[in-house]
Amino acid sequence: MIKTISDYCKEKFGTKVYRLALTTGATCPNRDGKVGVGGCSFCSEKGSGEFAINAENIAEQIEKAKALVCAKMPSSVKESERKYIAYFQSFSNTYGDTKRLISLFKEAIQGDEIVALSIATRPDCFSEEMFDSLESLNKIKPVWIELGLQTVNENTARAFNRGYTLDDFEKTYDELKKRKIEVIVHMILGLPGETKEDMYATSKYLSKKKIDGIKIHGLHILKGTRLAKEYEKHPFKIMSLVEYTEVLINCLKILPESTIIHRMTGDGDKKLLIEPRWSADKKRVLNYINKRIREEFL
C-alpha cells in the first residue's frame, strides 16, 4: 500500500490542500559560477519553475497563485475552507541572503489559509544560520525541504553536471532530520546511460535513509537546455509510458510504506517539450499510472 500526498494532507490538515507556486527570485550556485555554470543539463531557463507566479512581492504572488488554483477548484469548495501550501519551486531557494529569504518565507506563511511551507533547493545551499532559521519556522508551521538528488550514481550526476556529491546530500539530509524537518527527495527516471538497476539502486538508498517523501519524475528534454543539444547530436533511448510506469512501480515497491508519494510523474512546458512526447498528455499518463498502481497495490 502506498500513501500519496493527497492522503497525507487530508490526514494532517483535515482537507485537500493546494500548492501555490511562488518564487524567491533566487538563482543557483550551479549557474552563477560558484559551483558551475549552465546548471544541470536538463534544467530549463526558469529553473524548473515554469508555473511559478512572477510578481514583485510575496503577498501579490500568493493572491495571483490563489486565483489560478481557485479557477480549477470545484465550485463546491468554499473560500473559507481552502487551504494551501506556499511552494517555492524554481531554482535553489536557500541560496543567497539568508535574512532576505527567511523574511520571504515568514511572510508566505502568515495567512491562516497557508498550512505548510515547501522549499525546493540543493543540499549545497545551506548555512548554519539557514538551518537554525528553518528549524524555528518549523515550530510555527510545517516546513518541507525538497532536495533534488535525482540519482545516487556519481557518474550519471557528473554527466548531467549536478555539481555536488552524494556525501553533500547525506550531510544536509542528516542535519535537516536532526532538526525534525521533513525532507522530500526528487528522483529522475530515465537519465542518459542509467539502467533499471541504477534507478533501483537510488530507491534502495532512499529506502535506507527512510526519507519522508519522494517526487519521482521522468526525464524531460526541453528546448534551450544543454540536454536538448546533446540529444540532437547523440540521441539516446527514451522510455515509453509503459516502461516508465513499470520502473516507477518497482521503485515504489522498494520504498517503505511510510514514504509519502508526492509525485509519480511530471509535466514540463508543452511549448518546450522535445521528449518524451507522451508526457504532454497528462490526463492519459495519470490515468494509466493510476490504473497500474491499483493493479499492483490494491
Image (cartoon, rainbow, N blue to C red):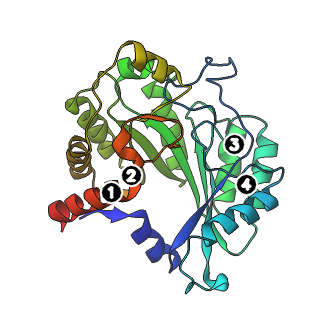
Q: Do callouts 2 and 4 mark residues in contact (Cβ within 8 Å)?
A: no
The label number, if any, that marks residue 284 in the structure image: 1
Residue at 67 percent across and 84 percent down: it is 80
Q: How many marks?
A: 4
Query: Label 3 amino acid?
Result: Met
Q: Do callouts 1 and 2 mark residues in contact (Cβ within 8 Å)?
A: yes
Give the quarter of the figure containing the N terminus.
Answer: bottom left
Residue at 61 percent across and 67 percent down: it is 69
Q: Position of residue 109 (x, y in %)?
A: 71, 64
| Mark pair 1, 4: CA separation | 36 Å
Q: Does residue 60 appear left or right of residue 34 in this picture?
A: right
Query: Label 4 amino acid?
Result: Phe
Q: Secondary structure at mark 1?
A: helix
Q: Secondary structure at mark 4?
A: helix
Q: Do callouts 1 and 3 mark residues in contact (Cβ within 8 Å)?
A: no
Closer-to-camera residue (154/49): 49
Closer-to-camera residue (171/113): 113
Dot 2 crowding, Cα within 10 Å, few <14, some 14–19, many 20+: few
First along the sequence among labels 2 and 4: 4
Dot 1 crowding, Cα within 10 Å, few <14, some 14–19, many 20+: few
Q: Position of residue 184 (x, y in %)?
A: 47, 49
Closer-to-camera residue (237/23): 237
Circle 4 is placed at which residue position? 105
Q: Secondary structure at mark 2?
A: loop
First along the sequence among labels 3 and 2: 3
Circle 3 is placed at which residue position? 130
Closer-to-camera residue (38/260): 38
Dot 4 crowding, Cα within 10 Å, few <14, some 14–19, many 20+: many
Circle 2 is placed at which residue position? 281
Query: Label 1 amino acid?
Result: Arg
| Mark pair 3, 2: CA separation | 39 Å
First along the sequence among labels 1 and 4: 4
